[in-house]
Image (tube, rainbow, N blue to C red):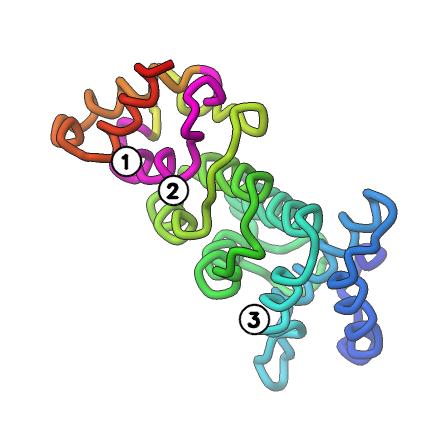
Amino acid sequence: LWAGRQPSLELFDILKPHMIDLAKSGSLEKRGHAETLSAMLLSAWAFTDDKTGQRWVSDSELRGILLASSDDLRSRMLWQISRWSSESWKTEDSKDATKGQKLDWPALLLSLMRDVWPRQMAAKSPTVSARMCDLVFDHEEVFEELAAVVIPLLTKIEGTRISLPSLRRSKNNVVDKHPELVLSMLYAILSDDARRWPHGMDGTIDRLSGADSALNNDERLIELRRRRDSR
C-alpha cells in the first residue's frame, strides 16, 4: 500500500477527489483495483493531519463513499479492516503496514462501524451482512462492543453465503459467553426458510437456551425454533 510508505498529505489531496469519484462510480473492472482502492481509502480515513488533527478522509466522506459504492468495495473494506485489526491483536503492535502513523486498528474498527458505516438500506445486502458477521465473530476480544453496533446494520442472508464455524466450537464458544447478543445477530440474518440456514445452526439454537435459560421465553428464539421445526 502506497509503495510501503505513508504518502504526503499534499500528494493525497491531489489524488483524493479522483479516488472518491472512482470508488462511487462502481466501474472498477478488476478485483485487484477494488482491493487496492478500498485499502487506500481506509488508510486515509485512519490517518490524521499532524497539525489539525483532522482525518485525511473525514467520517462523512467515507460514509458517502460506502453509501454510493458497490457491495464489492464495501465487502473489501470490511475484509481489510478486519485483517489489520486482527494483526494488531496478534502482534500487540498497532503500527500499520504503511510504516507511518501508529494506528489503533481495533479501536478504528469500532469507530468505523459505530460512527461511519451508513444505516440506509442502500448499504445493506446479504453479501455485506455475511462479511459483517465474519468480522464480528472473528474478533471475540471486542465481540460484545462490536456486535452491539453491527446488529442494526444487518439484513437476512442465505446459508450458502456464510458458515460461522466459530459457533460450532465445543469449548470457549462465544454462544456461551454472550448468548443474547448471538441470538440478536442470528435473528437478524437467518433466512425465514430454515433449509437455507448455515450448517450446524440447529445445534447453535439449542446451545443458546443452555447458555441462558431465560432465552427460552424470548420470542426471537421461539420463532427460530418454529422455523427450524417447520422444515
Quarter of image, res 166: top left
> Eyeballing the image, is 141 above or below 192?
below
Q: Residue furthest bottom?
A: 52
Asked if marks 2 and 3 touch (Cβ < 8 Å), the reply is no
Label 1 sits on what residue type? His
Q: Mark 1 points at which residue?
A: 178
Q: Name the residue under label 3.
A: 59
Residue 167 at x, y = what percent?
A: 40, 24
Three-letter amino acid code at disc 2? Answer: Phe
SS of the residue at dot 3?
helix
Distance Cα–Cα, label 3 vs label 1: 30 Å
Q: In the image, 5: left or right of 224?
A: right
**In the image: residue 121, left or right of residue 27:** left
Few, some or many residues within 10 Å of mark 2 (<14, 14–19, 20+)? some
User: The C terminus is located in which quarter?
Assistant: top left
- Disc sitting over residue 143 in the figure: 2
Quote the CA–CA distance across marks 2 and 3.
Answer: 23 Å
Compared to 135, does 192 lie above or below? above
Neighbour class for label 1 at 10 Å: few (<14), some, many (≥20)?
some
Residue 70 lies in the magenta stretch: no
- Main secondary structure type of the part rendered in magenta: helix
Q: Give the range drawn in magenta.
A: 175-199
Name the residue rendered at 40%, 18% in the picture: 169
Q: Is the Cβ of the residue at disc 2 closer than 8 Å to that at disc 1?
A: yes
> For the residue labelled by badge 2, is the local secondary structure a helix, a strand or a loop?
helix
Foreground label between 2 and 3:
3
